[in-house]
Image (spheres, rainbow, N blue to C red):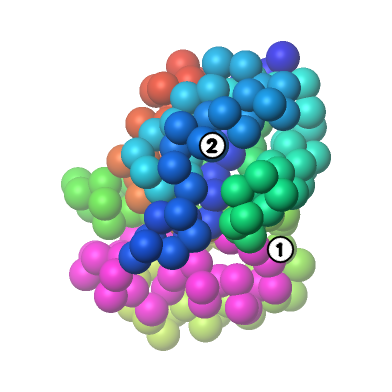
Amino acid sequence: MDTRFLLLRGVNVGGHRRVPMADLRSLLGALGCEDVVTYLQSGNAVCRSDLPVGRLASVTEGALQTELGVTVRVVARSSDQWATTVSGNPLLGLDDDPTRLHVVFLESAPDRDRRDALVTEATAFAPERLVVSGHDAYLHTPDGYHRAKLNHALLERRLGLAATARNWRTVVALADLAGVTP
């Protein structure tokens, strides 16, 4: 079994799409995951599973709908992918506040033309910064994510992919929780 990271998009925000973390742990256990741990109340889970990451994400989405009545997108990563995300952040030196650095986890690598168009468009949002690398988009939002024009919703629209964002503090905490080192 390999370590997997599961990120639920938009749960427990403003009372919508409620997914208690105890229920998420139980649900993942019923799907055959082991050593399930959740972090915060925002839909972050680390576990061990034999399922490939894409399959685990789709099975989890189906189980959330069937068992909890919640329709939510799930993005999954392997431990190797998570380590690459952590070690590959090109924006780390821009801010000492880890809540102003974000990773937008994309369901897959974006189409090159759409990615290039987004990167070009993003320059208009300076001082916000965007770098897209593989399945990840790194953001620096100096005025805070809640005010950012560069956010996961914009990225989803421009790239045509499901996405969910986590601040750098959460990304590093999940790596530590799983013992993943870059």
Q: What residue lies at 29% left-to-right and 70% top-to-bottom?
A: 146
Is residue 162 magenta-colored? Answer: yes
For residue 146, the mark is none
Q: Point out residue 76 in the picture as x, y percentages from the top left corner.
A: 64, 41
Cα distance between the residues tagged 1 and 2: 29 Å
Q: Nearer the viewer, residue 20 or 163?
A: 20
Q: Is residue 138 above or below residue 160?
A: above
Q: Is residue 124 magenta?
A: no
What's under tag 2, amino acid-wise?
Answer: Leu
Residue identified by numbered label 1:
110
Q: Which range of residues does the magenta coloring cover?
A: 138-163
Q: Where, by quadrant of the figure, is residue 82 drawn? A: top right
Left or right of 16 on screen, residue 76: right
Identity of the residue drawn at 44% across and 70% down: 151
The residue shown at (77%, 21%) is 50
Neighbourhood count class around disc 2 (C-alpha, 10 Å): few under 14, some 14–19, many 20 upward: many
Secondary structure of residue under mark 1: loop
Viewer-proximal residue among 91 and 85: 85
Indicate the quadrant where residue 128 lies: bottom left
User: Which tag, 1 or 2, sits closer to the chain's start?
Assistant: 2
- Report the quarter where the N terminus lies: top right
Q: Is residue 75 above or below residue 162?
A: above
Image disc number at residue 24: 2
In the rendered structure, which amino acid carries the disc numbered 1? Pro
Disc 1, disc 2: CB below 8 Å? no
Helix, strand, or loop for circle 2?
Answer: helix
